[in-house]
Image (tube, grey):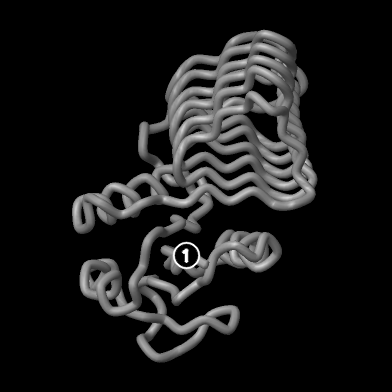
């Protein structure tokens, strides 16, 4: 099995570790997180150090890949970019829970995670470092840009587009053909029946824009 390293040690990382354990094709050598003291453990795996230690750890543990296990889109992007600067040849692993259902022609970018019970239908293109969360549904011909994420039970009708680093909240529903711009947050339980632009927070039934937000503003 390939040796991989997990970047991050929060609740999202717990879910990703469970996926890795269930698919049984990757070996987790350890965890890197700035808030974990070296020598401690997380979910039974050793904390190996900080981001800056990554080049040495890859050599020491013969690491061939990594997963950025951070739920917040902008934070995930910063960690992924830092890791790539430190280790330009590091591969980012895509992980798919065994209970997820993906059509044969679905394309997933590097570092993307698909969680338990998801359905992704034909013609879907998912970018790099995305999260398709538990029980979410992505209908035909949708496009998710890099670092986008869907919350648990989010539902996208056919031909929807979700922009870079945007988040569709828990249980939110996008009507067929709806487009959401980049760096936008759609609140949980929202009903999105028309396009929403970039760098805003929108929610409600139907969803409406509540305020502007900075492109890399945290939401978790």
Q: Quadrant of residue 90?
A: bottom left
Considering depth in this image, is 76 or 204 the residue closer to the camera? 76
Q: Is 106 placed left or right of 92 in the picture?
A: right
Residue 45 versus residue 18 in the image, above or below = below
Q: Is 142 placed left or right of 47 in the picture?
A: right
Considering depth in this image, is 26 or 163 the residue closer to the camera? 26
Residue 51 versus residue 67 in the image, above or below = below
Measuring from the top left, give residue 103's x and y in whole percent.
Answer: 72, 28
> Would residue 172 be seen by someone viewing this image from the given angle?
no
* View extreme (bottom): residue: 39
Task: Answer few, some or many: residues within 10 Å of disc 1's Cα (few below 14, many 20 plus, some between 14 and 19).
Answer: few
Considering depth in this image, is 140 or 71 the residue closer to the camera? 140
Measuring from the top left, give residue 67's x and y in whole percent.
Answer: 46, 57
Q: Is 73 placed left or right of 82 in the picture?
A: right
Q: Which residue lies at the image location 52% right of the left edge and 43% below the top edge?
A: 112
Q: Is 97 placed left or right of 36 in the picture?
A: right
Residue 206 versus residue 155 in the image, above or below = above
Count of marks overlaid on the render: 1
Q: Secondary structure at mark 1?
A: strand
Residue pointed to by mark 1 = 2
Measuring from the top left, give residue 71's x and y in whole percent.
Answer: 53, 52
Q: Quadrant of residue 36?
A: bottom left
> Would residue 185 be seen by someone viewing this image from the given angle?
yes
Q: Quadrant of residue 77?
A: top left
Considering depth in this image, is 189 or 8 the residue closer to the camera? 8
Q: Which residue lies at the image location 45% right of the left edge and 41% below the top edge?
A: 110
Q: Which residue lies at the image location 66% right of the left edge and 41% below the top edge?
A: 151
Q: Which residue lies at the image location 74% right of the left edge and 37% below the top edge?
A: 136
Measuring from the top left, give residue 96's x and y in whole percent.
Answer: 64, 48
């Amino acid at each position: 099995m390939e040796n991989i390293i997990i970047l991050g040690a929060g609740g999202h990382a717990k879910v990703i570790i469970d996926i890795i354990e269930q698919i049984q094709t990757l070996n987790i050598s350890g965890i890197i997180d700035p808030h974990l003291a070296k020598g401690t453990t997380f979910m039974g795996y050793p904390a190996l150090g900080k981001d800056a230690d990554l080049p040495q750890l890859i050599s020491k543990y013969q690491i061939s890949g990594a997963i950025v296990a951070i739920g917040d889109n902008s934070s995930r992007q910063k960690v992924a970019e830092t890791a790539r600067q430190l280790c330009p040849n590091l591969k980012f692993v895509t992980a798919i829970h065994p209970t997820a259902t993906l059509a044969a022609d679905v394309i997933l970018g590097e570092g993307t995670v698909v969680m338990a019970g998801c359905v992704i239908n034909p013609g879907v293109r998912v970018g790099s470092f995305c999260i398709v969360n538990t029980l979410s549904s992505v209908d035909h011909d949708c496009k998710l840009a890099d670092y986008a994420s869907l919350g648990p039970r989010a539902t996208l009708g056919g031909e929807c587009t979700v922009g870079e680093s945007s988040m569709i909240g828990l249980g939110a529903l996008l009507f067929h053909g709806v487009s959401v711009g980049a760096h936008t947050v759609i609140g949980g339980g929202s009903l999105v029946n028309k396009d929403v632009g970039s760098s805003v927070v929108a929610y409600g039934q139907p969803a409406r824009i509540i305020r502007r937000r900075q492109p890399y503003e945290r939401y978790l």
